[in-house]
Image (cartoon, rainbow, N blue to C red):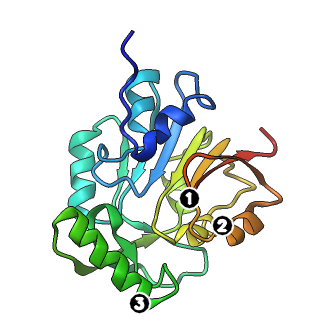
Amino acid sequence: MTSAKSFSLNQLDLKLKKYLNYKHGFFIEAGANDGINQSNTLYFEKNQNWKGLLIEPIAELAYRCKINRPKCIIENCALVHFDYESNYIEMRYSNLMSLVKGAMKSEEKEIEHIRRGCELQDIESYEVQVPARTLNSILEQHIIEKIDFLSLDVEGFELSVLQGIDFDKYRPAWMLVEARYRDEIDSFLKQLYEPVAELSHHDVLYKNLKF
């Protein structure tokens, strides 16, 4: 029997199947890129009839999401915390390694991250303003209630995204977080989630304590 095709980096989707092995779930993928390249959710849409929401801040990539994943809701924005006051936020483009300015807490680290991303992917970087929204506002807009899985890969900006969710109202059953700053993520989530698996050296799977 032919093994299922993985779309994720480090076969994260196949590793997730152990926990998400059921049909007709609902996913959210923040940092969706073009909807195919290194996607953590495409496997579940193709093989288990899941539906979902893809969020991608870079306009050209969000456009490709609409073409590549027509069954999904697509939102073109960066996710921010509740106290963020502007309607826009500055980003540095580097395709799969694009990031919000300030996400890595060090200008030197960000410049090196972008330089490496451009070199690995043979692309040119640019700075761009993108729409900024909380995940809460998007969930309210689309009247999304039950969330089986949230994939969060936003190059160091994960805590700010989590700080834009009302967990009393929206509580994903499972969350896969690229936890570059693991201690602050664990501290923020400790009353809500427990870490159950490290699926790569920086991708941590969290389980809802009420699940």
Residue 108: assigned label: 3
**Which residue corresponds to mark 1?**
202
Disc 3 is placed on an element classified as helix
Disc 1 is placed on an element classified as loop
User: Is residue 132 positioned above or below 56 on the image?
Assistant: below
- Contact, mark 2 vs mark 1 (Cβ under 8 Å): yes
- Residue at the location (45% across, 68% down)? 155
Residue 94, percent from left and from top: 27, 70
Are there few (<14), some (14-19), or many (20+) residues within 10 Å of tag 2?
Answer: some
| Mark closest to the chain's N terminus, 3 or 2 | 3
Whether residue 136 is visible here, answered yes or no, is yes
**Which residue corresponds to mark 2?**
182
Are there few (<14), some (14-19), or many (20+) residues within 10 Å of tag 3?
Answer: few
Residue 134, percent from left and from top: 53, 67
Query: In the rendered structure, which amino acid carries the disc numbered 3?
Result: Glu
On the picture, is 145 further left or further right than 47? right
| Mark closest to the chain's N terminus, 1 or 3 | 3
Disc 2 is placed on an element classified as helix
Kindly give the residue lying farthest to the bottom in the view shown: 107
Q: Separation of disc 2 and disc 1 at Cα?
A: 8 Å
User: Is residue 157 positioned above or below 48 on the image?
Assistant: below
- Contact, mark 1 vs mark 3 (Cβ under 8 Å): no
Query: In the rendered structure, which amino acid carries the disc numbered 1?
Result: His
- Quadrant where the N terminus lies? top left
Query: In the rendered structure, which amino acid carries the disc numbered 2?
Result: Arg
